[in-house]
Amino acid sequence: MADALIVVALLLVAGAATDAVTVRDPARQALVLSVLGTVLAVLFTVLQAPDVGLSQLAVGSALTPLLIMLSVRKVRRRGRSGDGAR
């Protein structure tokens, strides 16, 4: 049973990682990266590393995508102003 869970988790990780690479829009990439972080946290928990899973959940699925989204938002705002002044 545990082997089947590991295989399913690995397949989900492979699918989410492939999606993260193929998506072109940075905002959507951040969303897919968040899903990838959550799936990795599940994989680490299944592999009996709950401390690593909790760290991955905090950093990989919450903090990093949030920072990417804030950066994308700032860049898009700056691009809309059109004057190029900083």
Image (spheres, rainbow, N blue to C red):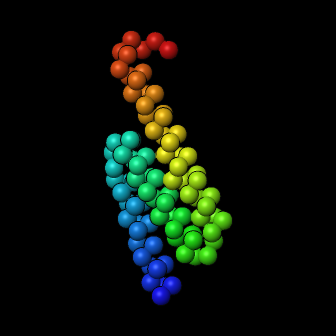
Percent coordinates x, y for residue 14 in the rendering? 41, 66
Does 77 appear above or below 4? Answer: above
Percent coordinates x, y for residue 21 in the rendering? 39, 53
Does 19 appear above or below 49? Answer: above
Q: Residue at x 46, y 53 (%)?
A: 34
Q: Residue at x 51, y 84 (%)?
A: 2
Name which quarter of the figure residue 83 lies in: top left
Percent coordinates x, y for residue 20 in the rendering? 39, 54
Percent coordinates x, y for residue 54 in the rendering? 61, 61
Q: Residue at x 34, y 53 (%)?
A: 22
Q: Residue furthest bottom?
A: 1
Q: Residue furthest right?
A: 51
Q: Residue at x 49, y 85 (%)?
A: 3
**What number of labels is visible?**
0
